[in-house]
Amino acid sequence: MAEETKPNLIETIKQWPRSRQISLGVVTVLCLVFFSVLVMQARHVDYQLLFGNLPTSDASAVITRLKDQKISYRLENGGTAIYIPANKVYEVRLELAGAGLPQGAGVGFEIFDKQSFGMTDFAQKINYQRALQGELSRTIASLAPVEGARVHLALAAKRLFREQQEKTTASVIVKLVPGRKLNDGQIQGIVNLVSGSVEGLHAGQVSVIDANGRVLSKSPQAETDSPLSPGLQQYQQSLEKRLENRAQSLLDRALGVGNSLVQITASLDFSQREHLEEAYDPNGSAVRSEQATTEKSGNSTNGGVPGVQSNLNESAGIQGFNSSNRSEETTNYEVSKTVSKIVESVGSIKTLSVAVLVADRQLPATEGSEATYEPRPAEELTSIEQMVRSALGLNNERGDQIVVISRPFENDFYDSTAPETTPGADIYSYVPMVKYGLLTVAALLLYFLLIRPLVKTLKGEEKMVEHYKTVEQLESELSGRPLQLEGPNAEAVKLREEVMNSENISAQVIKTWLKEG
């Protein structure tokens, strides 16, 4: 019995057909190139934005800090944007925040961290003003729509007499984020922030402008001249929007979404009125009070015949008695009176003006022609008007108006697509997942294209498909004599039988080739 030789991969590959060797070489080269690209990409550091739009002073301080920590960085956008390796962004941000970087626009109260004994009082006041301006600038710049801010203060010196005291003023310039704007509430918030942070500064002495030089804040005189305050304007807009949504939802269900448009203008009465009315009823009276008084009085008197005789010998005269009675009764009546106090609500609706635009009716397209549109009939427009009028509660006596018009809609308005956005810095968060996905795909390709065929070839796991035997081979096996093959293919058939009956490793490889061929 022949000794089994150890499988030699190189010798096995040499025995493969030329096409199979070329395929193996191509797959091996592709795998090497693919893994080399992955390794080089893994060694290449992915940079992510650390800070953007930094002032020159803050950028210099941040770079100095990165150099001290030996962290690689990259500058872009003219040095205002700093990029560092993506795996260190959050850690470095926290460390720089603990060190007070970036400081933002101007200098804050950290200017007093280093004191000098030779500093004059004037220098102290200037540093205090600079610190106050810097702190206010940083606070305003932290607002979402604000990209940067500068604050200028004109602090008035204190005077002995009030008549000589000047007013403190302030000016704020804000640079807004592209596409953002400040509403009236945010502008008023900036004004109140600055006025509340500086002693003796009133809100009317604060001016806010944007980077284009437009005045955003309103003076007290302008607010007095304005018929509506920001709160009243917002209430009017919210009322109009609520009525528009009510009518629009009804039309969308009746005509379909995108086939109608409703605009409402509301005229509101913001005047405050109080009516105090007192009404007297002359025919009606009521007893308010009654008073009754009775008096009785009397006295005795001596009398007689006038003359000398009645006064002599102590003779008694004739005695008499006088009495008097007095009674008094007082009744007070109150006239019937009605007092009414009427307070009218603020913001009541004076008039409503409603405009309804509906799309023309689409006619079905015929062969060889596109769809056409025709105006809606007057009866349908009248029904739409009645429906909207009832939904909004329009009153003709109040002077409300409504107009319903049928017009073709421009399809380009709805077909317009938003401009494509360029990929931002968020793509760096997906890079590790992409790498892991590519490694998985490479491993699968390596297994299915290289490892698995080699294992099958070396181990011969698959069963061989044997050809049917001929009549001569069967008779030879039954008689026990070797088969005598003749012809040009006799040697090939004989070699095939030896390979099929052999247990050698090389024979197993040839079996696999025969099966695959």
Image: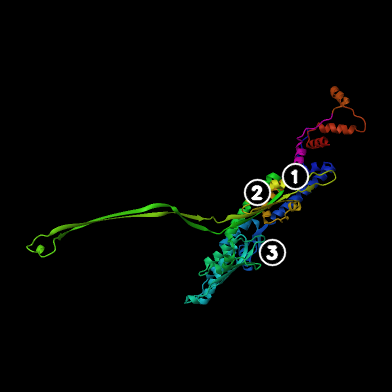
Please name whichever residue, 367 or 95, is drawn nearer the observer in this view of the structure.
367
Q: Outermost residue, left direction?
A: 313
Left or right of 15, for residue 251: left
Circle 3 residues within 10 Å: few <14, some 14–19, many ≥20: few
Circle 2 residues within 10 Å: few <14, some 14–19, many ≥20: some
Earlier-in-chain disc, 3 versus 1: 3
User: Which disc, if any, is residue 77?
Assistant: 3
The quadrant in which the N terminus is found is top right
Left or right of 251, for residue 194: left
Q: Is residue 132 visible?
A: yes
The quadrant in which the C terminus is found is top right
Q: Is residue 142 visible?
A: no
Q: CA distance from mark 3 to mark 1?
A: 42 Å
Earlier-in-chain disc, 1 versus 2: 2
Magenta stretch bounds: 441-467
Q: CA distance from mark 1 to mark 2?
A: 70 Å
- At numbered mark 2, what does the secondary structure look like: helix, strand or loop? helix
Circle 1 residues within 10 Å: few <14, some 14–19, many ≥20: some
Residue located beneath label 2 in the image: 389
Earlier-in-chain disc, 2 versus 3: 3
- At numbered mark 3, what does the secondary structure look like: helix, strand or loop? loop
Q: Nearer the viewer, mark 2 or mark 3?
A: 2
User: Which disc, if any, is residue 127?
Assistant: none
Residue located beneath label 1 in the image: 445
Counting from the top left corner in percent of width and height, residue 502 is at 80, 32
Location of residue 185 by image quarter: bottom right
Q: Amino acid at mark 3?
A: Asn
Q: CA distance from mark 2 to mark 3?
A: 58 Å
* Residue lying at 47% horizontally and 77% vertically, measured from the top left: 161
Counting from the top left corner in percent of width and height, residue 456 is at 76, 38
Please name whichever residue, 57 or 422, is drawn nearer the observer in this view of the structure.
422
